């Protein structure tokens, strides 16, 4: 029994937290742990996963309906498990559960994790938190449902096994996971590739607005709250726009802005160059992430945001290591 299994065994009330606007790796990690504890202990332990709102397409994962966004749970948890979250600021309104918990553990693969947990399991070289969990959870309890959660996190964080951080190990883990017999084709279609008509229209609008900047090295587009209202679409439905912006030839960085408040925009960034680490860029602008995929915040109306981002990215590209 490793120390994680021991912590679970010693705890009666357990909560699981991830980062706000959870992605496939965050939701997959959360549910892999939830289903793992339930598989071993059934109803003998209380396990509460807390995440902010996420797309209903994730409902195909077992017990996705058990994830709550309740900010006022009165339980003092014996153990708070944090997954895929690089800092306490990213816990949304659930930080109190972490602060009040008797024991805390974090599993993460982001660079520069600052979560003040009692135990930290950090592997920045891992492609996904789900890959770390694959190595940590006791495989005798693995089943189709747990394998599906872990596979989803690895598939989504690797751009379905395309990004550079994908290794032989990543693929062999994925190979082992599909051997549990879930329908990975349908899973990837439902969660990664299929889009609703409204999502396609939102992507179309974002493409129509696309501009290049920084001498053609950067593509930029945006969607604001008015767009989402007109298209009757949620913020959780436009998180893949950046994926399509990245798939443009001869660019080095893709940037997508979407409104998260009055004069507040979240910027998703993707780098296609090893010497442009967008996680460094994001950290200087209230954000963080990975070398090739990160997010940060800009303030002001969209025109001001676009201008400042263009200036900042120009500077950033100029300072690259090998000065292309
Ligand atoms: Mn992740």
Image (cartoon, grey):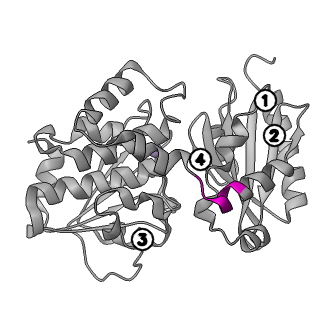
Q: Is mark 1 on a helix, strand or loop?
A: loop
Membership of 199 in magenta stretch = yes
Q: Is mark 4 on a helix, strand or loop?
A: strand
**Can you tell me whether the CB of the residue at mark 3 lies under 8 Å from the nearest atom of ligand 1?**
no
Which is more N-terminal, label 4 or label 1?
1
Q: How far apart are marks 1 and 3 (CA)?
A: 38 Å
Q: How far apart are marks 2 and 1 (CA)?
A: 7 Å
Assign the N terminus to one quadrant of the image.
Answer: top left
- Residue at (63, 65) in percent of width and height: 235
State the predominant SS element of the stretch in magenta. helix
Q: How far apart are marks 3 and 2 (CA)?
A: 35 Å
Q: Is residue 269 above or below residue 277?
A: below
Which residue is disc 2 drawn over?
A: 219
Q: Of the residues tagged 4 and 2, which is closer to the observer?
A: 2
Q: Of the residues tagged 3 and 2, which is closer to the observer?
A: 2
Please tell me how crowded label 1 is: few (under 14), some (14-19), or many (20+) other residues with Cα within 10 Å. Answer: many
Q: Marks 1 and 4: CB-CB under 8 Å?
A: no
Q: Is mark 3 on a helix, strand or loop?
A: helix
Which residue is disc 3 drawn over?
A: 94
Which residue is disc 4 drawn over?
A: 288
Q: Marks 2 and 1: CB-CB under 8 Å?
A: yes
Q: What element carries label 2?
A: strand
Q: Of the residues tagged 1 and 3, which is closer to the observer?
A: 1
């Amino acid at each position: 029994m490793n120390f994680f299994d021991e912590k679970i065994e010693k705890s009666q009330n357990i909560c699981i937290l991830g980062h706000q606007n959870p992605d496939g790796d965050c939701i997959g990690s959360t549910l892999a742990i939830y289903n793992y504890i339930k598989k071993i202990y059934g109803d003998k332990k209380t396990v509460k996963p807390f995440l902010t709102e996420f797309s209903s397409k994730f409902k195909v994962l077992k017990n996705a309906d058990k994830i709550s966004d309740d900010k006022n749970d009165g339980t003092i948890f014996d153990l708070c498990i944090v997954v895929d979250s690089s800092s306490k600021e990213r816990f949304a309104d659930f930080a109190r559960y972490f602060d009040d918990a008797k024991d805390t553990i974090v599993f993460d693969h982001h660079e520069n994790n600052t979560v003040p947990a009692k135990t930290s399991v950090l592997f920045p070289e891992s492609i996904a938190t789900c890959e770390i969990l694959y190595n940590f959870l006791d495989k005798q309890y693995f089943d189709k449902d747990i394998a599906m959660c872990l596979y989803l996190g690895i598939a989504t964080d690797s751009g379905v096994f395309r990004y550079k951080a994908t290794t032989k190990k990543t693929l062999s883990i994925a190979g082992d996971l599909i051997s549990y017999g879930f329908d990975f084709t349908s899973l990837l279609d439902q969660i990664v590739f299929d889009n609703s008509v409204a999502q396609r229209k939102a992507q179309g609008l974002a493409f129509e607005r696309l501009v290049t900047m920084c001498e053609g090295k950067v593509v930029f587009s945006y969607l604001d709250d008015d767009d989402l209202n007109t298209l009757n679409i949620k913020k959780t439905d436009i998180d893949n726009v950046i994926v399509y912006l990245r798939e443009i030839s001869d660019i080095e960085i893709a940037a997508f802005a979407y409104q998260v408040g009055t004069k507040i925009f979240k910027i998703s960034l993707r780098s296609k160059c090893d010497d442009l680490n967008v996680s460094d860029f994001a950290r200087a602008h209230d954000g963080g992430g990975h070398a090739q995929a990160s997010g940060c915040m800009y303030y002001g109306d969209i025109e001001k945001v676009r201008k400042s981002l263009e200036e900042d990215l120009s500077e950033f590209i100029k300072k690259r290591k090998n000065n292309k």
